[in-house]
Amino acid sequence: MTRPRIRHVIWDWNGTLLNDLDLSIEVMNGLLARRSLPPLDRARYHALFDFPVRAYYERLGFDPVRDPFDQLSVEFISGYDDRRFGAALHRDAAPTLAAVRATGIDQSILSAYRHETLHEIVAHFGLTSQFNHIAGLDNIHAHSKVALGRDLVARLGVAPDEILLVGDTLHDFDVAQDLGVACALVAAGHHPIERLRKTGAPVFTVLSAFAAAHGF
């Protein structure tokens, strides 16, 4: 049976369109250094990072009594936001978005990033006009995007089997499964290709490869 054509692409932001992997590692290493905990490199980060973020913090060795998760979240986001404009888009992000838009397919962002700050950084890169909806969480704790995704799909007025979600983590795949939408994963962000391939979803090394495979 032929799958219906894609009418809407839902993009993750951090790691998928925004190349903030090294920034995230550097900011977290600041938190770890202030508590004499082992630092992260890319390999260790890729092995440990996951959703919910609270469990990731525990795997890093933070003492939940001395350093409650809410407090650590504030410290991390403060450090990240101070430097967020130092991160760049993935090299092929803007051309890929433009190519998708040129086909007449609508696009949205679904992100665990805080809603107001998400709008600011998307505008900073001049991308706001590319998206019909920009949906971020109403807090800084990055628990899950599932409920937010359900609300977004309901607002789109598009059948789930005509939607494609593009992300860079296992959580993005889980969200797509919950929403009943197709999923493509790009291994240029917060989870490595080996972990992503275990989902069975199509995995691409860069956005341009994703675009070529989908005829954008």
Image: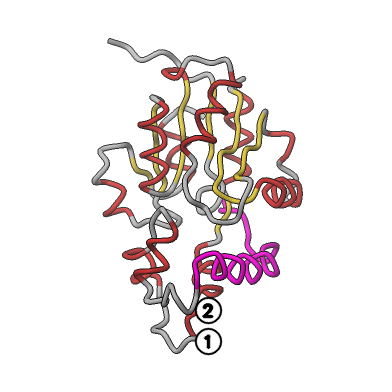
- The part of the image, by quadrant, that contains residue 74 is bottom right
Which residue, given by chain and number where applicable, does mark 1 sit on? 34
- The part of the image, by quadrant, that contains residue 64 is bottom left
Percent of width and height locating residue 56: 39, 64
Render colour scheme:
secondary structure
Query: In the rendered view, would you say 146 is above or below 151?
Result: below
Is 190 displayed left or right of 30 in the figure? left
Query: In the rendered view, would you say 209 is above or below 83?
Result: above
| Mark 1 and mark 2: Cα distance apart in space | 5 Å
The image quadrant where one finds the N terminus is top left
Q: Residue at x 44, y 75 (%)?
A: 65
What residue type is disc 2 on? Leu
Q: Which residues are magenta?
A: 68-91
Is 197 displayed left or right of 207 in the figure? left
Dot 1 and dot 2 residues touching (CB under 8 Å): yes
Dot 1 alpha-carbon crowd within 10 angstroms: few under 14, some 14 to 19, many 20 or more: few
Q: Secondary structure at mark 2?
A: helix
- The part of the image, by quadrant, that contains residue 61 is bottom left
Label for residue 123?
none
